[in-house]
Amino acid sequence: MVFSLKKFLLFLLIAFPLVTVLTQKNYLVSAEDDIDVDDDTVDIEQDAGDEVSETAVTEDEDATPTVTKSPDGETTVLFLKPKPGLLGPSGSPELHAGKLVEFLVGFTNKGSQGFLLETLDASFRYPMDYSFHIQNFSTLVYNRLVKPKEQATLSYSFYTDESFAGRPFGLSINLGYRDVEGKPYLDAVYNETVNVVELEEGLDGETFFLYVFLAALVVLLLVLGQHLLTSYGRKPARKQQIERGTSQSDDVDFEWIPQETLREIRKNASPNSTRARKSKKSAGSLSD
Amino acid sequence: MQKSLAFLGLVGLVLLASAAELNSPDEKSRLLVSKQLLNKFVVESMDVVIKYSVFNVGNVAANNVQLKDASFGPDFDVVGGQTEVSLGRIPPQGNVTHTVVVRPLKFGYYNFTAAQVTYTSGEDTKEIQQGWSSEPGEGYIAPFREFDKRFSPHLLDWAAFAIMSVPPLLIPFLLWHSSKAKYEAVLLSKKSK
Amino acid sequence: MHKLPACLLVAFIGIVSANSCKEPAVTSKSYTTVDASVLTSIAYLTEFELSCGGQPAKIPLYAEIGGQLFNVVRGNKYQVSWTEEIAKATRGDHIVNLYDDEGFAQLRKSQRSGDAPTPLTSVVVNHPGAYSGPLLNSEHLAAITGVIVVYIAITCRGKLLS
């Protein structure tokens, strides 16, 4: 009994890594396949490959094929942003990277009983295999009752990520609703491949002036800094001047000079120089 | 004679069928109505801009389109626009917008609900279609005081700050200035001596 | 002898059909959002009443504002309203040209060919410009004042020391 348990454990130890490796291989292969099928631009695709491994390729579990739309419910979808109808210059639907996408979903109740519109969700999927989700946008809960022969509009908006630029995606929009008996329905309102394109924007005035203002601020700071630096740098120079000045200025201490030398200087300078006398006087007053 | 009658009948049938085809369920107008708040914040007693956009995604014109928004009760003051209007005729692939400006009189959570739209599809049907716009949903109406606290320029506060910061600057300066004046007076008197 | 009145009649009908509203007069009340600090778009609204030769009229109208065509909606009064993003909103007078059915048809034709018909009448919506918060935040102003005070103090000190 114990032996068999050991064996089982051993088997588990071998089997578990094997299984994980195999499954991972499977994932890798499928991802690579997708990349190979994806067209032209190679450098972006490599990026995309990285993203694939990161942004969790999950298999579709919630969209069970048994839940379909009700024959009494009719839906229409209208994209408002980036532009009505969504058609780009190439004729295929386009979204703008990093920009808001907004759409309306209209629901018409053609039957004789009410429907409760519960949720609306949007997701990006692989254009080649819609069961692979790339990004799920939030599921909005509406809980709106649509009476028989009435119509209702729901609005939904999401932002496309800027890193998704230049790639095709399968955009899938699903409306989940129930009838009065509680039977769930799921209507794939939109299920098409869209291109996410990078919108080339000219420099808009506000940001331009912001940059100008920032540049002006930097220049101002530089000027101020330079001013301060020079005013600090000037100080030692001034000090030297002051020191030079003391040697020439009035209050000079002559006491260290021997008397006979002093007398000689005075004799030489006596006719026109009052400096020495003056200095003596001021020195005297200071000692007062 | 019978043959010709039969032929006429056939022609009539074809005509009827074509007429029916003209009025077939594919030929109808379909309106999508969005109700949007064009606000960054909804603040008590400040403008709230509500924009209704009606899009006709059908293939015939919608006639006698009526828009009615009864969701603004006594808690709102309609300062611009009308909440019950006739939008007239909307051609296929056309759209019409309508704007109303209201001011909430109370603050707190408020559920902005749908507006009602009625119209007749095509030129000659009398059947009135009834639809509801999208719902902006529940939003928070901020009290004006809260908004003011966050976004007003706080001039009074800054003035108080300036006044309070004046003494610690001015007192040392005055002390220094008086001593300087004294020193200069002494120096002057010495010089003049 | 019989032809003349017939001609006159035809001419009269012609005038009537060309201008379903004679001597149009409008009394309007406009509203634009002035405080843009909480908004993403500026709303322009005008509500007006139309009278034709002194009689209040309830005819379908269409509006043209700066080349764009609008439906004029009708409640108790006529209303023309549109919104513009704050960055794109222009201040000053916005002229709303009003057309009746026929004028509108002509206008749509003329948008392809070029010459616009004269409008029935027009309404002016004046937007004085919107306040979207102070140009300079007070805390920034205070910081700048502080920097200036420091600068003055340092230069004074520099002068004194030299």
Image: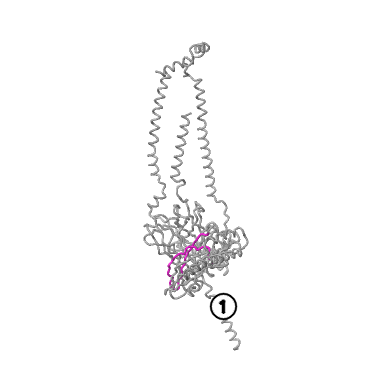
Can I make out residue C12 in this image? no
Residue A141 lies in quadrant: bottom left
Q: Nearer the viewer, residue A103 or A281?
A: A281
Q: Residue A135: x percent and y percent?
A: 52, 62
Q: Give the residue pinned by disc 1.
A: B18
Which image quadrant for residue A183? bottom left
Taking depth in this image into account, of B19 and B180 the one nearest to the observer is B180
Q: Is residue C140 visible?
A: yes
Amino acid type for the residue under numbered disc 1 = Ser
Q: Position of residue A60 (x, y in %)?
A: 51, 68
SS at badge 1 = helix
Q: Using the image, name the chain to which the residue with label 1 belongs.
A: B
Q: Residue at x 40, y 44 (%)?
A: B155
B41 relative to A172 in the view: left or right: left
Residue at the limit of the structure toward the bottom, as seen here: B2
Does the magenta portion include A273? no
Q: Is residue A156 magenta?
A: yes
Q: Looking at the rendering, in which quadrant would you find the N terminus of chain C?
A: bottom right
Q: Which residues are magenta?
A: A132-160
Q: Between C58 and B87, which is closer to the camera in this rendering?
A: B87
Query: Residue C84 location in percent, x, y?
Result: 50, 56
Residue B133 percent location from the top left of the image: 45, 65
